[in-house]
Amino acid sequence: MSGKILILTGDAAEVLEVYYPYFRILEAGYEAVIAAPQKKVLNTVCHDFIEGWDTYTEKPAHRLAADIAFADVDPSEYAGIIIPGGRAPEFIRNDADLPRIIRHFLEEEKPVGAICHGAQVFLALNDNSFFQGRTLTAYNACRLEVERLGATYAEETLHVDGNLISGHAWPDLPGFMREFLSALQNNRQSSDFEQQASNAI
């Protein structure tokens, strides 16, 4: 099985939800590959709350180089995928190559991690069959999108449903990445077992 993990993002991604998974993936011995609509330097943002505001504020954060454009991604080369939140999901889901990429991971039941607004990209599939009977969580403002997928919205801030690992927001990143890396390990062990069984025939 591949040792590469794909991170799907774009401009205005929440900085913690990109960098935390990126470094945890590297720490675990995998190769982290940043994919965006274009191969360019991305602008991440920091979302935070100010007393008296009904929603979050946004400030510029670190810049981040994308390694590959969506059009050039061969999803079969990757063991799993992470979709950070922020505002990036609302516009990267319009990219023509995004459904092709996400569909592969769902069909092959590889680990799929979506945090905060990340679940918004699933609407680009125009196919709710992947989410019927499934449960996932997201930032509370994305509850309608989750339910429109045909999924059940989980109130807890971290939820695992098979190969789908979902988190509410950046404070949930420790548990989110722990579960994602565990799913990768389980998937790898299963693939190794299947390969050994095939070789024994």
Image: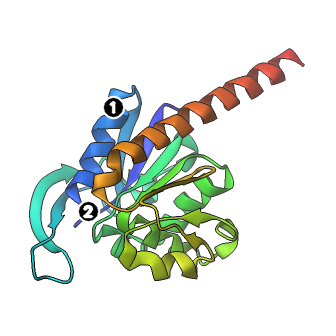
Which residue lies at the image location 19% right of the left edge and 74% below the top edge?
56
- Residue 92 horizontal/vertical position (percent): 37, 70
- Residue 47 horizontal/vertical position (percent): 18, 66
In depth, the one of 56 and 191 nearer the eye is: 56
**Relative to 42, is 36 on the left or the right?**
right
**Badge 1 density bin: few <14, some 14–19, many ≥20, Cα 10 Å:** few
Mark 1: amino acid? Leu
Mark 2: amino acid? Ala
Location of residue 104 by image quarter:
bottom right
Which residue lies at the image location 67% right of the left edge and 49% below the top edge?
108
**Relative to 23, is 41 on the left or the right?**
left
Image position of 161 with respect to 154: above or below: above
In depth, the one of 39 and 34 nearer the eye is: 34
The mark nearer the N terminus, 1 or 2, is: 2
Location of residue 30 by image quarter:
top left
Which residue lies at the image location 64% right of the left edge and 68% below the top edge?
131
Which residue lies at the image location 62% right of the left edge and 35% below the top edge?
187
**Relative to 180, is 92 on the left or the right?**
left
Asked whether disc 1 touches disc 2, contact meaning CB atoms under 8 Å apart, the reply is no
What label sits on residue 13 in the rendered view?
Answer: 2
In depth, the one of 58 and 173 nearer the eye is: 173
**Badge 2 density bin: few <14, some 14–19, many ≥20, Cα 10 Å:** many
What label sits on residue 26 in the rendered view?
Answer: 1
- SS at badge 1: helix
